[in-house]
Amino acid sequence: MEIPEVVIDRLPLYARALAGLEARGREVVSSQELAQHVFGDIKGAAQIRKDLSYFGRFGKQGRGYNVRRLLEELRQILGLDRHWRMALVGVGRLGRAILGYEGFAPQGFRIAEAFDADPAVVGTRVDGLVIKHTDELEKVLAASPVDVGIVAVPAESAQKVIDALVRCGVSAILDYAPSAGHVPRGVQMKRIDPVLSLQSMTYYLKARPLSPK
Amino acid sequence: MEIPEVVIDRLPLYARALAGLEARGREVVSSQELAQHVFGDIKGAAQIRKDLSYFGRFGKQGRGYNVRRLLEELRQILGLDRHWRMALVGVGRLGRAILGYEGFAPQGFRIAEAFDADPAVVGTRVDGLVIKHTDELEKVLAASPVDVGIVAVPAESAQKVIDALVRCGVSAILDYAPSAGHVPRGVQMKRIDPVLSLQSMTYYLKARPLSPK
DNA sequence: ATCTGTGAAGCACTTCACAGCG
DNA sequence: CGCTGTGAAGTGCTTCACAGAT
């Protein structure tokens, strides 16, 4: 069966909510309660039940879902029960912030290699990682493959970097560049571009009075 | 007429592609060419035409779209022809990176106020901005309103901050917190959470051989 | 001849509503 | 009796295909 991508995108939200419930010692949760936590609204309850039904029957009728069990299932489905190695390309201001981000490790994501094209940066140590030259990307990743590539280079070089990562067999890319980069079928890419988000939100703000200088 | 949100989300992509074409001196572009730039594929051409048709008739049959004219229209539709004031809440590692991000200003987005709850940070100057205490948020924003709120606090405090921003009349929020924050109807919120993106991409990676330690 | 603008058809996701089980 | 799991109905977005403009 082909599972819709929107469903996959929601699973991490469910997992996160369940982790919160588990931390608070909760043992059982209904789809209504879970919807309240995830969407702030009970209306998503049927959607949660249907989403989960793609993968199995995890609940008990009349009772709800066992929190620990369901969380464990989701982790396994999403592959969150493993560690994932990532390669960062681009160690400028943005790249350094990504290297220093504390949110990855607790979730099993580790930046194992970092590359930059600036000779002044190559060879230096940032957050415990020796920066290698982007030209060596294919050689290094051949010897030490990663699961995910993180692109944090200027827009102009983004497509070149994406292509190189794909050539190395990387099939999941997190793209921080404000680029229009493309990947072949079979490769996952998610864009993390705050400006795009802002630019679509402002559409809905136009009606507001112009903010004072 | 009610315009689908997915359409609004695509407009900034079109605008960005057009800006690139304009910079290269291109005067006219067809929907096919634009689709090639935006999606890396001509299959989106009909979608681009339909999206644009929600707002007017900007093309010339047999010829295509005037690049400058269409870009101007999109800017106006999205409100990109204005400047937008933003307030940042949370000046930790992540908040500092956001304050230092050079990608906002060229697109008309400026962080005008920054808040933190840590007394050691309040009063210090970061990237030319004096940090104010989060307790003063409502007072400060009453005197100097902003259009957009940026949330970069720990997950536990995110909902409280979101609520405060909404009370101040902020109706667009960029949420960097790994939270399940909710906003009332009529308020826009976009989540920028790299971990969520990673966690859904790993679903598709599970089939790959386990990466060596 | 070419490319837009757009009704209509097609497809995919969401929501309903209820049978069935604990 | 409560709540899940799920076909079926509903809704909304995407894609098609062509009339019409240049």
Image (spheres, coloured by chain):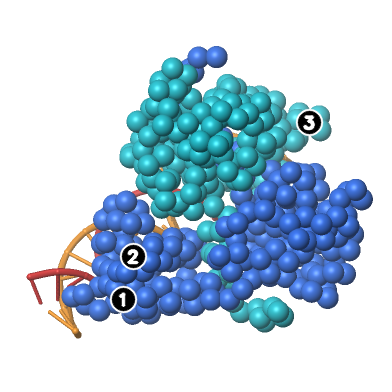
Chain colours: A blue, B cyan, C orange, D red
Image coords of residue A134 (percent x, y): 86, 57
Question: What amino acid is labelled 1 in the image?
Answer: Asn
* SS under mark 2: loop
Do callouts 1 and 3 mark residues in contact (Cβ within 8 Å)? Answer: no
State which chain disc 2 sits on: A
Distance (Cα) linking label 2 and label 3: 54 Å
* SS under mark 3: helix
Distance (Cα) linking label 1 and label 2: 14 Å
Extreme-top residue of the structure? A213
In the rendered view, tell whether residue B202 sits above or below residue C20: above
Image coords of residue A203 (percent x, y): 49, 31
Distance (Cα) linking label 1 and label 3: 57 Å
Question: What amino acid is labelled 2 in the image?
Answer: Arg
Extreme-front residue of the structure? B120
Q: Residue at x 55, y 37 (%)?
A: B120
Residue to which mark 3 is pinned: B23
* SS under mark 1: strand
Image coords of residue A207 (percent x, y): 43, 23
Residue to which mark 1 is pinned: A66
Q: Residue at x 35, y 53 (%)?
A: A39
Which quadrant would residue B103 be assigned to in this image? top right
Residue to which mark 2 is pinned: A24
Disc ID at residue B7:
none
Question: What amino acid is labelled 3 in the image?
Answer: Ala
